[in-house]
Image (cartoon, grey):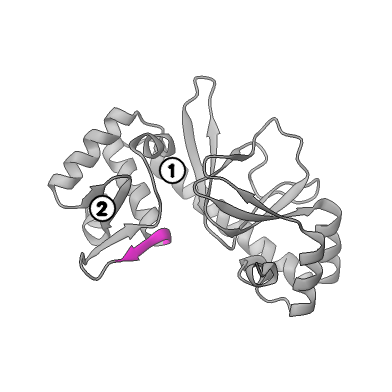
Amino acid sequence: MNKVWYLSQINLLEELPMEDLQMIDAMAPMSTVKRGTMIITPDQDNNNLYLLKQGKVRLFKMNEEGKQLTLGLLGKGNIFGETETVSTGSGSAYVEAMDDALVCILGKQDFENLLTKRPQVALKMVNILTQRLRESEEMLEHLAFRDVRYRLLYLLVKLAKRFGESQSDSRPFLKLDLTLSHQELANMIGATRESVSVALSQLAKEDVVRTGRKEIALDIEKAELLLEE
């Protein structure tokens, strides 16, 4: 497997020349993470940054009753983790692999050396973290005070825009490149599995969503119109 090619697809590093990618390749071991694995937990003593080369991860918080609230969904090309000098917003959150993932693990000292040698990486890091913060604030605003139907629609629109695939035989629906159960959707929006199942059934009757075995397709235009009501 060509790890350097994967590194070249990571947003943070896309502008680096091949010799720098080869340097990072030597310092950042690659790891395969199975779907459902908790890569980071709040009580974990972690001082690494993770470069997501393949797969998707979910950042979420959990209260004392075990209720979960999603903070962000990241696809390949993203970075997460914490060091003493760099925070990606995941320090007090759980990070879970939503499917089988490939990550590079970069230690604090190696990453700081990289920033010193390549200031453009530091600038790009600032841009990525600023965008991450905006997305998290937007998601929390939309999920905090709305009913289950609205929260589910909002989540599905976000997922479709980021992970949706057009199907020639089912336009205008976008099929989510994710395998999600009703319980997993419920965990993402802080709802119960039963309420999510009811909302999905209603949306299916309105032909806004189409569902199969852990498969979901969304008519994003209809969904966005419903969000505006």
In terms of depth relative to the viewer, which is nearer, 55 or 2? 2
Q: Which residue is mark 2?
A: 228
**Segment tinted magenta in the rendering:** 162-166
Q: Position of residue 64 (x, y in %)?
A: 54, 20
Taking the view exactly as shown, the residue that stands out farthest to the front is: 1
Residue 107, above or below 149? below
Tell me the distance, in whole angstroms, between the alpha carbons under discs 2 and 1: 15 Å
Residue at screen point 68% across, 67% down: 3
**Could you say whether the residue bearing mark 1 is in a helix, strand or loop?**
helix
Residue at screen point 76% across, 56% down: 29
Mark 2 surroundings within 10 Å by alpha-carbon count, few (fewer than 14), some (14 through 19), many (20 or more): few
26 vs 56, left or right, is: right
Q: Which residue is mark 1?
A: 141
In terms of depth relative to the viewer, which is nearer, 86 or 137? 86
Amino acid type, callout 2:
Glu
Q: Position of residue 41 (x, y in %)?
A: 64, 35
SS assignment for the magenta stretch, majority: strand
* Quarter containing the N terminus: bottom right
Residue 18 counted in the magenta span: no
Q: Which mark is residue 162?
A: none
Amino acid type, callout 1:
Glu
